[in-house]
Image (spheres, grey):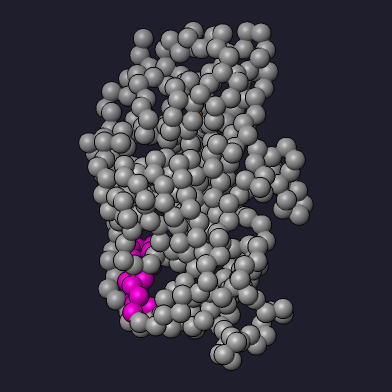
Amino acid sequence: MPVYIQRGKIPHRRHTVFKSPQGNHYYEEHISRLGFSDIYSNVYHVHMPTRVAKVGKFRPITLEALEGEHRHRHLKSFELKPDGDWVTGRRPMMFNNDLILGTSSPVRGTADYFYKNATSDEVHFVHKGKGVLESMFGRLPFDEGDYVVVPRGVIYKMTFESDNNRVFFVESFGPVDWPKKYRNQYGQLLEDAPYCERDIRQPEFVEATDKVGEFPMHIRLRGGIQEYLWGHHPFDLVGYDGFYYPWILNIKDYMSKVGRVHLPPPTHLTFTGPGYVLCSFCPRPFDFEEGAVPIPYAHSNVDSDEVIYYVDGSFMSRKGIDVGSITLHPYGIPHGPQPGLLEASLGAKETGELAVMVDTFNPLKVTKVVTGIDDANYPYSWQY
Ligand SMILES: [Fe+2]
């Protein structure tokens, strides 16, 4: 839930006549969540946003689940070859009724279509690579370490200006939010929150593109992608205001907290969504109580599946993990540091780990995408 912004030209009063200097009407569109009862933006188009030139084909997307096996998993995502763009390059690895998550490795460049996810908010954690997200709200350059958050319904495209791009993504069927415990009664981030409004990067406004023609639009629905041709260029806003637009938080702007003894992952909470939390494990000093064990204790979060995407540094509580690895520790059995890590951690003063964790409150299904990158020995890495 970002903050109110105003860009370009807007009329002083909502829902009133608003014309160009040539006397042509601009067309207002109200984009809102939860019907008319949550955050929204009012945007002003050169052309009527409702115009469709042609209804194209529907391409079904089915996530094929691996059935029948319950175990800890270690997936080596960097073994997947770069392919596709920021949409077609997605490799969904896990899903439930609340989200889809996986990685993408888009090749340099972009696509010749515009894209709207009509069913999910998207979080693209840019591990490697840089580029620019262009949307109806303007330009949003992104770089390594960025959480690029695109609310459901935003028309956008991502262009990568680098090779060897690596992205960990979450498609969240409900809104991606800043945790309530970090906000005051007015929504402002609290003084002791781990990030503040200054850390949130907002779109740079770009003047409206006024072009008529046929513009391919791919709209993600629950069951697949519906193709359309838009009758005009979709980035035709002369202005907008509100709370609804894409934004970025960089993981290195996340201010971790440290305790006298080990603090649990909710300390590292970054975003919330219906059915999950997302946390950032960042470099920090270790706990300072004499005798404190810096690494976590084994734990059974009996309601949760835990997914960790490993970004950089030596992850203090795991053995055999590489940059780009993903672990899944499902509900039903405990997990924790492997043998020898407790002893090795004693006396350590700091950790350089950088990782993103998603804890879901409903069990995840693993897709067939993981076949071939799944370390079958990982479930036995706790043997001694
Ligand atoms: Fe855990």
Q: What stretch is highlighted in magenta?
A: 214-230
Q: Is the magenta region chiefly helix, strand or loop? A: strand
Report the residue at 50% width, 60% height from top. Answer: 139
Image quadrant for the C terminus?
top left
Question: Where's residue 321, x and y in %?
Answer: 37, 25
| Magenta-drawn stretch contains 218 | yes
Counting from the top left corner in percent of width and height, residue 130 is at 41, 47
128 up-or-down from 121: above or below: above
Q: Hey, which quadrant is residue 192 in on the image?
A: top right
Residue drawn at the location 45% of the way across and 57% of the way down: 133
Residue 247 to residue 182: above or below: below
Q: Could you say where residue 323 lies in the image, as x and y percent from the top left?
A: 37, 30
In the image, is residue 211 above or below residue 136?
below
Quarter of the image with the N terminus is bottom right
Does the stretch in magenta take in 132?
no
Residue 250 left/right relative to 67: right
Q: Which residue lies furthest to the front in this view?
A: 21
**Residue nearest the observer in this picture, 238 or 351:** 238
The residue furthest right is 185
Rendered location of residue 230, percent (x, y): 38, 78
